[in-house]
Amino acid sequence: MSTPNGFPQHSRVCLTRSMEGGAVQDLQAKKAGKAAKKEAGGDGAPPKIATPISETLKLLPEELKANMKIKSITPRPPRKPRLERAASLDEKSWRKWRRFRTSQESLTDPNETSSSNGSLQEASPSPPSRGRASPCNPCCQQDSLHSSPDALEASPGGKSRGGASDLGKRASEISSAFGGLLRGKGFAGGKPRLSQIMPARPLPPMELNVASHSLRTANRIDADCLDYRHYSQHKFGRVSSSLSDSRLQGNGSLYDSCSTDSMKSTFSVLTPIRAKDVRSRSYLEGSLLASGALMGAEELSRYFPNRSMGIFVATWNMQGQKELPANLDDFLLPTDPDFAQDMYVIGVQEGCPDRREWEIRLQETLGPHYVLLHSAAHGVLYMSVFIRRDLIWFCSEVEYATVTTRIVSQIKTKGALGISFTFFGTSFLFITSHFTSGDSKVNERKLDYNKTIQALTLPKNVPDTNPYRSSASDVTTRFDEVFWFGDFNFRLNKDRETVDSILSQNPDTDVSKLLAYDQLTSEMSRGSIFKGFQEADIHFRPSYKFDIGKDSYDTTSKQRTPSYTDRVVFRSRYKDDIQAVKYSSCPVIKTSDHRPVFALFRVKVRPGRDNIPLAAGLFDRDLYLIGIRRRATRELLKRREQKDQRSSSICSIS
């Protein structure tokens, strides 16, 4: 399409643009010449004319002040970041700097083109100003300038202190920092892949409370331990607390208890230890109140916040039977308490010929959470002490001693076996005995008791926790907590018919009429035996004597009177240290003429010193491996039998 002058329309547009560009360049050249004359002092030197824009940007700040009118803008403080957008600050900062770089890209390299501004030759030669430096949105540009206070500083009069060269240097720095985003590695597969870069200025400060939802999700507690703390508090009233936990809270690194728990569950169940605590030294080290002591109060409170532990004590006269019960769960793990105990002590009289097999069966029943701390034997008297695997480090060396009450010492069917050790700062003594049998031999049984407390030489190397309250003539006074259990052979002073009549008239839990004829109860009330000892209330039927494999009492020609021969008694140096929780028998085990008798206790534990000889975590590892292997094998065989039983079932159609 042509114009009235005969030129094509597009040619006219290009000519107009070139004329306008030339006029602008002539105007800039004249201004530059006048400035050069003033600088030279009017010496008549010819002015140096520079028409390219790159030369114009090299003008001094005074010339820019004289030739440009810069719009004054009052700087605004940066916007206060919102916590919910804290994760996107890097992205927001990159977008602002990218817009600034795009707007000033033409000032950095005259040979490089910009996708948003076009080439430098085609750009308008108007000098850049603080309020408007590119065809971008003014608001965006203004925010960009505010976010970089080092690029352009505002003077008190509202004029720019830095020249175009400073602005170009700043733009060059920004371009070099972010230029690699779009060149070479900018895009792959249609999506930009941004390399990890550091922000141009420090991020705004955040609150110290880091208990955010994202961190709680990252430090999520295992599912099987998620609600154990709350459940244990509800069930036992225990509150997990330690000095290390309290020191972590409020120190600036972690703000609340939730964050502390999350940190512990992420790395370990152990309480974190600060380097400051490790560096500190105290004259109290090794004492009860020392921080970090193995037997000290802090460690005890971490494992037992209420400073009491559960102990299972059992006695059983096995009658020398080779056959062991098929299942010991009802004996060692009664269903009444919801949780297993911390320690299991089992004493046996007239034990089975294969003592090792008996211990394996105990380990198999208790499972991998328990280890055999110590076992000892005196003839056919056996005793085994199992403890939770986590608690073995707080036990002293285990010591034991034996006493024979028979006239002929080679026959070791009657006597006593004692095991002692210190747990934290509390000393324990466990004695299992088999006294003289016979309905009328009460005096002989009292002699057995007196010989035992005098001849049992314990402790040996482990120091007494309170020697001022000990007696050289009574071993039971040299320990904090004493448990004595076994077949004491005390009978009921009543004939068989009367006892059977009382048992048939009263329910199983009401045995008060029978206990009125009990020899042991009568002798303890007089103080002639078991001085200082107590016994929990009895609410079970006599444990002796049964027909093997049956629930009926002796039906042989001897017609022995049912009696409470198997007992568990206890004593403590301190009042109310031992609380009896349950005292019962196990009627489902019928392989002997005695029924096993057991008792559950809650025992108070005190902190101790680190100067006692420790067991160093020793336990019977071979027994542990055999018991666990057999436990798994039995479970596999049980499942295989169930599977075979289902596959072999026959359905008949009538």
Image: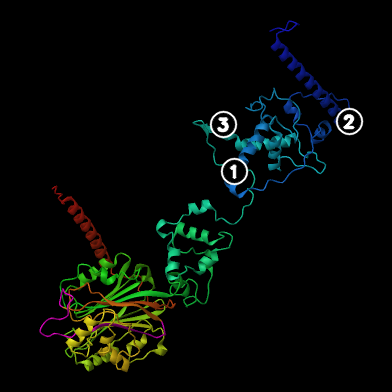
CB within 8 Å, label 3 to label 2: no
Q: Which residue is mark 3?
A: 183
Q: Closer to the camera: disc 3 or disc 1?
A: 1
Viewer-closest of 278 and 603: 603
Q: Which mark is residue 41?
A: 2
**Label 2 crowd (10 A; few <14 / some 14-19 / many >=20):** few
x%, y% of residue 584?
A: 29, 77
Q: Closer to the camera: disc 3 or disc 2?
A: 3
| Badge 1 amino acid | Asp
User: For the magenta stretch, what is the residue range?
Assistant: 547-576
Residue at the (57%, 35%) spot, across then down:
181
First in sequence, mark 1 or 2: give its number.
2
Instruction: Name above or below for residue 163 compared with residue 348.
Output: above
Viewer-closest of 373 and 335: 335
Viewer-closest of 218 and 296: 218
| Badge 2 amino acid | Gly
Q: Is residue 234 left or right of residue 448?
A: right
Q: Is residue 414 visible?
A: no
Cα–Cα gap, marks 1 and 2: 52 Å
Cα–Cα gap, marks 3 and 2: 49 Å
